[in-house]
Image (tube, grey):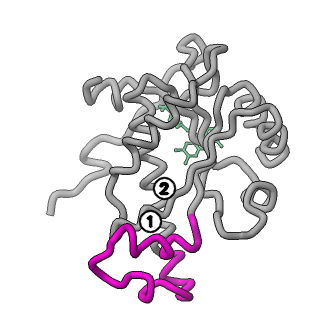
């Protein structure tokens, strides 16, 4: 895939072909996205791939009304979550420095890192998924407190956004909205 296929012509999908995404594709997705950069190599995002009927039945009541049909019809919905105790992995992820002590018990510092890095890792997931031929439908339209209590009752992981994944149905797409021009969105200083 070239850059135009990954970005310029890639679309957000709300409908998918009626075929599953094999587990090996989800494993391949993670095997690439994990290499995207994060603060101090903290890798704080966690990914729950909702594929089974039973798990989908637990997810649907947590999703806003306008997103219910999209999630119901999608072969996979990824919950992109942040691990509030990501620093417990720091001895493995950054062994040359004591990042555990820097983060442990410091809620504001932990939340700052999560707020910056979990959506970044979610974005890496979208780009890798597209490169693997999958369509993506990121969504913030869900009840985060409800979802967290359903899927993460111990409070350690917290959802940042959810994202449907599947083989996109091109016929479902409506005309695309524009983007801002360079002059509107960028400055070179
Ligand atoms: C963080 C995020 C949250 C979104 N939330 C929703 C949502 O709750 N429901 C929905 O239908 N689309 C949602 N979208 C999809 C956007 O509306 C869509 O990506 C945007 O309009 C661009 O569409 P395009 O990629 O087809 O050009 C969300 C996208 C992102 C990145």
Vertical order, 129 against 155 (above or below)? above
Q: Which residues are magenta?
A: 83-111
Q: Nearer the viewer, residue 75 or 90?
A: 90
What secondary structure prevails in the magenta region?
helix
Vertical order, 164 against 113 (above or below)? above
The residue tagged 1 is 116
Q: Residue at x 52, y 34 (%)?
A: 26
Q: Nearer the viewer, residue 29 or 148?
A: 29
Q: Position of residue 24 (x, y in %)?
A: 51, 30
Q: Position of residue 77 (x, y in %)?
A: 65, 37
Find numbered disc 1 in the image and state the secondary structure of the residue it sits on. Answer: helix
On the rendered image, what quadrant is the C terminus found in?
A: bottom left
Is the residue marked by circle 1 packed among few (<14), some (14-19), or many (20+) residues within 10 Å?
A: few
Q: Are marks 1 and 2 in contact (CB under 8 Å)?
A: yes
Quarter of the picture for ligand 1?
A: top right
Q: Nearer the viewer, residue 67 or 38?
A: 38
* Image mark for residue 51: none
**Mark 2 near ligand 1 (CB under 8 Å)?**
yes
């Amino acid at each position: 895939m070239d850059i135009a296929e990954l970005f310029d012509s890639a679309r957000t999908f709300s409908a998918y072909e009626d075929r599953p995404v094999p587990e090996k594709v989800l494993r391949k997705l993670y095997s690439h996205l994990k290499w995207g950069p994060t603060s101090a190599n903290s890798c704080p995002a966690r990914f729950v791939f909702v594929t089974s009927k039973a798990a989908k039945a637990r997810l649907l009541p947590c999703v806003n009304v306008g997103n219910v049909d999209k999630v119901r019809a999608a072969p996979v919905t990824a919950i992109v979550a942040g691990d509030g105790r990501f620093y417990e992995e720091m001895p493995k992820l950054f062994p040359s420095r004591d990042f555990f002590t820097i983060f442990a018990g410091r809620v504001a510092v932990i939340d700052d890192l999560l707020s910056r890095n979990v959506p970044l890792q979610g974005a890496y997931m979208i780009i890798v998924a597209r490169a693997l031929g999958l369509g993506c439908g990121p969504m913030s339209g869900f009840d985060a407190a409800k979802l967290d209590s359903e899927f993460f009752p111990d409070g350690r992981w917290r959802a940042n956004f959810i994202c449907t994944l599947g083989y996109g149905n091109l016929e479902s797409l409506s005309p695309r909205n524009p983007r801002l021009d360079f002059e509107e969105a960028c400055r070179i200083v």
